[in-house]
Image (cartoon, rainbow, N blue to C red):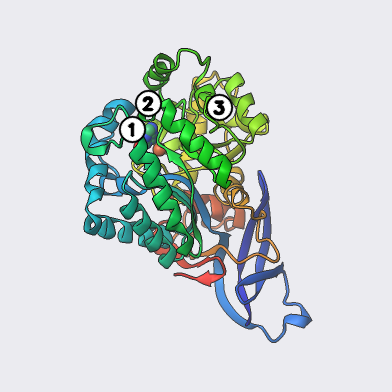
Amino acid sequence: MLTALRANIIAAPALGKLEITEYGYLVLQDGVTLGVFPTLPEIYKTAQIEDFGDALLLQSFADMHLHAPQFPMVGMGMDIPLLDWLNTYTFPLEAAFKDIEYARAVYTQLAATLINNGTTRVCMYGTIHTDATLLLMRILDDAGITGYVGKVNMDRNAPDYLCESTGESLRETLRWLGECERFRNIRPMLTPRFVPSCTGELMGGIGRLAAARGLYIQSHLSENRSEMAWVKELHPDCGQYWETYEKYGLWKDHTIMAHCVHSDARERAAMREHGVYMCHCADSNINLASGIAPVRAMLDEGLRVVLGSDIAGGSQLPMLSVCAQSIRASKMRRILTGWTEEILTPAEVYYLATSAGAQYFGGGTGFPVGEPLHALVLDDKGFSKTVRTGANPPTLAQRLERAMYLADSRHIAAVFSAGRRVK
Ligand code: GUN
Ligand code: FE
């Protein structure tokens, strides 16, 4: 069916660049984008038009790092640093996902909240529990969310109630992979939690599995100084944290490393050379007092950077809020580094939160012709006209900026994921 969405269309074709089509048309054939036009081309005259008036039509968001089982503790317990936080709050909560009915209740609520906030692509962690992770994938798929989910691997330095044996972890990973064919838009990615949680034997097994099956990997890197010191103790033969992943075949193209707060120039060069993605989790890094990642340097050096909410180290699931928090963090870094680093702009974080994530999954930037639509409609009339009285009304770029600071799910009027309307 030929349809057209009419609204103020804002795309992020490149880092820092906005492509704005004032009250234009986004034309679709069966949910696949045919193009964005300022006026409706003659050949599409028969399109059924849905008019969103003065609303903004934005690209929907990609949350490239979050922990589904931590959703129940979102906004709580951020008074202690990473390693204490894991032991005190996180591990006991994750253990509860042994109970499939508990998992069903939490994951159903999470999927609905993601869609409500315009997040249609994810790279997400489950728990060590295979069946609960499969259920998470089923629930996300049914809700219309796309992307990758991982069954978490952990075989050491965890409490008994959340620890697998090495053999069990690898066997369960194989069983899990065997059941992942049935989903439409959700695929598996390998998820060794982080170096302290995994023996070398387990990491080696996961590395071989990734190579044999062409699977992607997600984990954590250089988030916190105590964590880094521990990794150094566990692997005295490795000069830097990243080399422990490299040693076991986990450091490669499309591997996502979350945080990278303390990654120095050498570690960053290794990321760039190997096509490793850096997932910036600004809110979490401040909540857990981990630090502020050197995102500007990473962008200047040509690293592939994406954004993550990192629920529940991060307390903001809406990616609009993650955008605002990424800008705030860049300003704090600027203050703390003697005013030497450039701050992130709204156009840059919009790109990182949308197009950069889409590219991870093989998509194009902006609203790519020939791809199923990922978009949201933001009705900002509640605050778009405020403050500026008398003078010029805000531009569309200013309205995008303001939405990052002021909008919430109530302002998201419609969401499209993989060509389908899901809100
Ligand atoms: N490192 C290992 N596990 C975790 C986790 O659950 N959250 C964060 N922020 N860092 C981690
Ligand atoms: Fe994390």
Q: Is residue 352 left or right of residue 101?
A: right
Q: Mark 3 points at which residue?
A: 246
Where residue 166 sits: x, y (%)? 36, 34
Secondary structure under tag 2 reads helix
Residue at image location 37% in from the left, 19% down from the top: 226
Quadrant containing the C terminus is: bottom left
- At label 1, counting other C-alpha atoms closer than 10 Å, the crowd grade (few under 14, some 14-19, many 20 or more) is many
Kind of residue indicated by mark 3: Glu
Q: Badges 3 and 2: C-beta atoms under 8 Å apart? A: no
Residue in view at x 53 percent, y 14 percent: 239
Residue 155 image label:
1
Report the quarter where the N terminus lies. bottom right
Q: Can residue 395 be seen in this view?
A: no
> Percent from the top left, x then y, of residue 34?
70, 71
Whether ligand 1 has any atom under 8 Å from the Cβ at mark 3 is answered as: no
Q: Which of marks 3 and 2 is nearer the N terminus?
A: 2
Q: What residue did someone put label 2 on?
A: 196
Judge from the rendering whether residue 176 lies leftward or rightward of residue 343; answer left or right: left
Q: Which residue is drawn at 25% across and 56% down?
A: 100
Instruction: Please name the amino acid that badge 2 sits on.
Output: Pro
Return the residue nearer the eye: 421 or 349. 421
Between disc 3 and disc 1, whose residue precedes? 1
Callout 1: SS: loop
Disc 2 versus disc 1: nearer the observer: 1
Q: Residue at x 22, y 53 (%)?
A: 99
Give the CA distance from mark 2 to mark 1: 9 Å
Indicate which quadrant contains ligand 2.
top left
Q: In this view, does 230 lie above or below 95?
A: above
Give the Cα distance between marks 3 and 2: 15 Å
Q: Badge 3 local density, few (<14 within 10 Å), some, or many (20+)?
A: some
